[in-house]
Amino acid sequence: MASLDKVPMLPTGHEALLVQLRQLKEVERPAVVEAIEEARAHGDLSENAEYHAAKERQGQIEAQVIELEDMLARAVVIDPKTLSGDKVVFGATVHLLDEDDKPVKYQIVGQHEADVRAGRISFSSPLGRALIGRRKGDEVEVNTPSGDKYYLIETLEFV
């Protein structure tokens, strides 16, 4: 279902979606059409598992294409290098100290770009929501399933 909301993303996330869309349209879609034609050649379609599997895959590809095209149409590409300031905003890289004074670093990114292991959290995640609008030196409390967590914002950078 399409939404009218804008989808913020970094330039790298936008490019990744374009690559994924190209892959679906130029490689996977033609391959599944070929698989359908090959399965049709085997005769009776009512009991042809290869045909039904290929048709199901075709439906999945078309749904992905529609979703990616919708997301790209609503994309607002934000390059963090063009940003500055002392507030946490989309694209900012935030250096934090956790409750044990252990340093952690996260970049605030779009939902499809999030990868906690790589230090990228979604702006809509609990921590992302808690950080947006805060400044260097602010203490942040985040409610998580494992209990409340506390962070201190040490520095911000826009890279």
Image: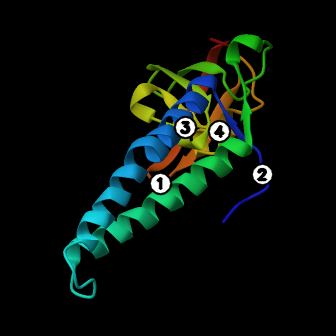
In the rendered image, is residue 1 in sight?
Answer: yes
Farthest residue to the bottom: give it: 46
Q: Quadrant of residue 4?
A: bottom right
Mark 4 crowd level (few <14, some 14–19, many ≥20, 10 Å Cα): many
Q: CA distance from mark 2 to mark 4?
A: 14 Å
Q: Is residue 52 left or right of residue 61?
A: left
- Determine which residue is flagged by label 1: 145
- Determine which residue is flagged by label 3: 17
Q: Check disc 4 and report its element: helix, strand or loop.
A: loop
Where is residue 139 shown, x and y percent of the image? Answer: 66, 28
Question: Residue at image x 21%, y 77%?
Answer: 49
Q: Are marks 3 and 4 in contact (CB under 8 Å)?
A: no
Q: Check disc 1 and report its element: helix, strand or loop.
A: loop
Q: Which one is in front in this view, the residue at disc 2 or the one at disc 1?
A: 2
Three-letter residue code for mark 2 = Asp
Q: CA distance from mark 3 to mark 1?
A: 31 Å
- Determine which residue is flagged by label 4: 123
Three-letter residue code for mark 4 = Phe
Marks 1 and 4, the one that precedes in the sequence: 4
Question: Residue at image x 75%, y 21%?
Answer: 135
Mark 3 crowd level (few <14, some 14–19, many ≥20, 10 Å Cα): some
Q: Which residue is at the front of the view, 58 or 12?
A: 58
Where is residue 87 shown, x and y percent of the image? Answer: 78, 21
Q: Check disc 2 and report its element: helix, strand or loop.
A: loop
Three-letter residue code for mark 1 = Pro
Q: Check disc 3 and report its element: helix, strand or loop.
A: helix
Q: Which residue is at the front of the view, 81 or 52?
A: 52
Find residue 5 and name its label.
Answer: 2
Marks 2 and 4, the one that precedes in the sequence: 2
Q: Which one is in front in this view, the residue at disc 1 or the one at disc 4?
A: 4
Above or below, comparing residue 63 to residue 128 in the picture: below
Q: Quadrant of residue 140?
A: top right
